[in-house]
Image (cartoon, rainbow, N blue to C red):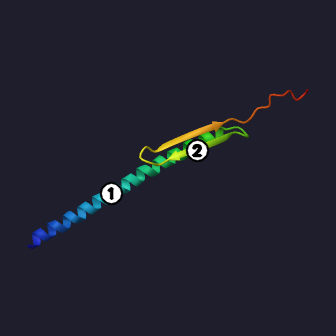
Amino acid sequence: MDTTSTVIAIASIVIAASRTLLALWLRLLWRTRLEQARHRCLLGAARTLGPGARLDLDADHGPGDRLRLTITPAPTCTEDPAA
């Protein structure tokens, strides 16, 4: 191989590797922002709960990436305290 072919081959390898790294970095950035938005959403939901209420979280990070929240309100007293 001559010098030109060697330079082109090395440049192609470097460009392919840098594109792969850029794609991974962009995916990580997108995932980080998604997790930050999810965190803000969960904090907002937790702050609105009254005392004694319960928030159950079920997260599935598979191909579907599912997040299920179950909010159980605080038990209420049905008896008359004056009786």
Judged left or right of residue 78, residue 82 is: right
Tell me the SS state at disc 2: strand
**Residue at 10 percent of width and 69 percent of height:** 4
- In the picture of the structure, the residue carrying the numbered disc 2 is 57
Q: What residue sits 86% from the left and 27% below the top? A: 80
Q: CA gap, disc 1 to disc 2?
A: 33 Å
In the image, 25 versus 63, the foreground residue is 63
Residue designated by label 1: 22
Q: Residue furthest right?
A: 83
The residue positioned 30% from the left and 58% from the top of the image is 20
Residue 8: give x, y in percent of width and height. 15, 66
* Residue 27 percent coordinates (x, y): 38, 52
Q: Earlier in the sequence, mark 1 or mark 2?
A: 1
Quarter of the image for residue 81 reads: top right
Amino acid type, label 2? Leu
Q: Which quarter of the figure has residue 47?
A: top right
Quarter the C terminus occupies: top right
**Image-based side of 19 in relation to 33, left or right:** left
Are discs 1 and 2 less than 8 Å apart at CB?
Answer: no
Percent of width and height locating residue 29? 41, 53
**Secondary structure under the numbered disc 1 in the rendered image:** helix
Depth check, front residue: 83 or 22: 83
